Amino acid sequence: KVLSKKASTRVDMSLMVYLGFLLITFFILATTLSKPSSMSLAVPDKQNKEEPQETEPLKASKVLTLFLGKDNTVWALDRIAADDDKAKTDLKKVSYGPDLRTFIFQSQGQVDREHGKDDKGLSQVVVVIKPLKSSTDKNMVDVLDEMMISQVKRYAIMKPDTPVDSMVISLVGESLGFRPGHKCQG
């Protein structure tokens, strides 16, 4: 009888592990890691001048006022002064996302049809954002994102502290003012 040698059935995996680590290292170094993105926010310079600059008064027909409320809702007054009698009936409830974006685009379009664009070709709509006590920071970020997406160049973040605001807010059924920690100059 001839005895045959049986080959070993053990496979050396050390080269495969080495190759795996080389591939992992290559892909980690070759891909770009996601960089945190930030939004630029332009704020006016502090003016030390004692004399106020004369500007043209802002017409209510160019202003969209957004009250950021609870339960991810936005209360909007579109081209109506808050002290107008129509404010009580024309206060609209809008949700974030596509509904708010569509609402902003419609308001922009209406202002552009009524007043045209300015000499730089920009829409003359002005959005006034008033976060209520019950709104969250996420709500503020969502609205600022909508300003960037809809290319609104003129917007202001203000405290809802006027008597007219309290009248509108009483219609909504929310409390007046900012949450603690909100820092905003009106």
Image (spheres, grey):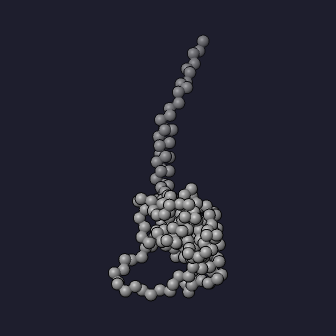
In depth, the one of 104 and 80 nearer the eye is 80
Give how far across and how far down residue 113 sits, in percent. 65, 81
In depth, the one of 55 and 44 nearer the eye is 55
In depth, the one of 132 and 162 nearer the eye is 162
Whether residue 172 appears in this view of the structure is yes
Whether residue 129 appears in this view of the structure is no
Give how far across and how far down residue 154 sits, in percent. 52, 76
Give how far across and how far down residue 12 sits, in percent. 50, 32
Image vertical order of residue 16 relative to residue 41, above or below:
above
Give how far across and how far down residue 29 sits, in percent. 46, 53
Q: Residue furthest top?
A: 1
Task: Specify whether 81 is left or right of 183.
Answer: right
Image vertical order of residue 124 relative to residue 90, above or below:
below
Which image quarter holds the N terminus?
top right
Q: Give the residue drawn at x 50%, y 50%.
A: 27
Number of residue marks: 0
Q: Give the residue drawn at x 56%, y 60%.
A: 173
In depth, the one of 116 and 25 nearer the eye is 116
Q: Give the residue drawn at x 61%, y 75%.
A: 85
Q: In which quarter of the image is residue 147?
A: bottom right
Q: Give the residue drawn at x 36%, y 80%.
A: 47
Which image quarter holds the C terminus?
bottom left
